[in-house]
Amino acid sequence: MKKYFLILGAMITGVIGLHAQGNFMQMTPQERADNMTTRMQKQITGLTGDQVSQLKTINLDFSQKMDSMFQASSGDRSAMRGNFRILNSSRDSTLKTVLTNDQFTQWQDYQTKMRARMRNRGGGGGNN
């Protein structure tokens, strides 16, 4: 009986995860930027009001460019992957100008953990 509930729980978690991933690209760039900024506020300690304001601008720009990139690629994952790496690298360079070294390290640590979670869930991030 315990096995049954564990399997059922795992299935429900998987469905919820897939549903959440699907909704990510259905959000507007503004909604994605707001979510990203909120996540950053939770993960990075010591942010000032000015930093949060700058992060909102950076995240909106990133989300808009990601949206354009997604549209232009017509769903071609390999094309998107390369372009996303460039876009992400550009955002990181901009974040370094806004965040302290410690804050940027906190953000990188969070991103590393999230990538690992996605790989472990089978959500990609690697050889798809």
Image (cartoon, rainbow, N blue to C red):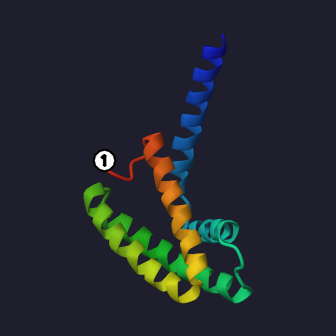
Residue of label 1: 128
- In the figure, residue 53 lies in which quadrant? bottom right
Residue at the far top: name it. Answer: 1
Q: Residue at x 66, y 15 (%)?
A: 2
- Specify whether 53 is left or right of 128: right
Residue that appears at 65% across and 71% down: 44
**Would you say 74 lies left or right of 49 here?**
left
What residue appears at the point 30 percent right and 55 percent down from the top-left corner? 77
User: Which one is nearer the viewer's eye here, 42 or 45?
Assistant: 45
- Count of labels in the image: 1
Residue 117 placement (x, y as % from top left):
51, 48
The image quarter containing residue 31 is bottom right
Which residue is painted at 36% across and 68% down in the image?
84
Residue 111 on image: x %, y %:
51, 62
Q: Is residue 107 visible?
A: yes
- Residue 69 in percent (x, y) is at 36, 69
Q: Is residue 21 above or below residue 30?
A: above
Q: Residues within 10 Å of mark 1 (few under 14, many from 20)?
A: few
The amino acid type, in three-letter code, at marker 1 is Asn
Quadrant of the frame with the N terminus: top right
Q: Percent position (x, y) of residue 8?
A: 60, 22
Q: Is residue 60 above or below residue 23?
A: below
Identify the secondary structure beneath mark 1: loop
Image quarter for residue 110? bottom right
The answer, for residue 25, to whether it is visible in the render is no
Work out whether residue 59 or residue 118 is closer to the camera in this orientation and state it: 118
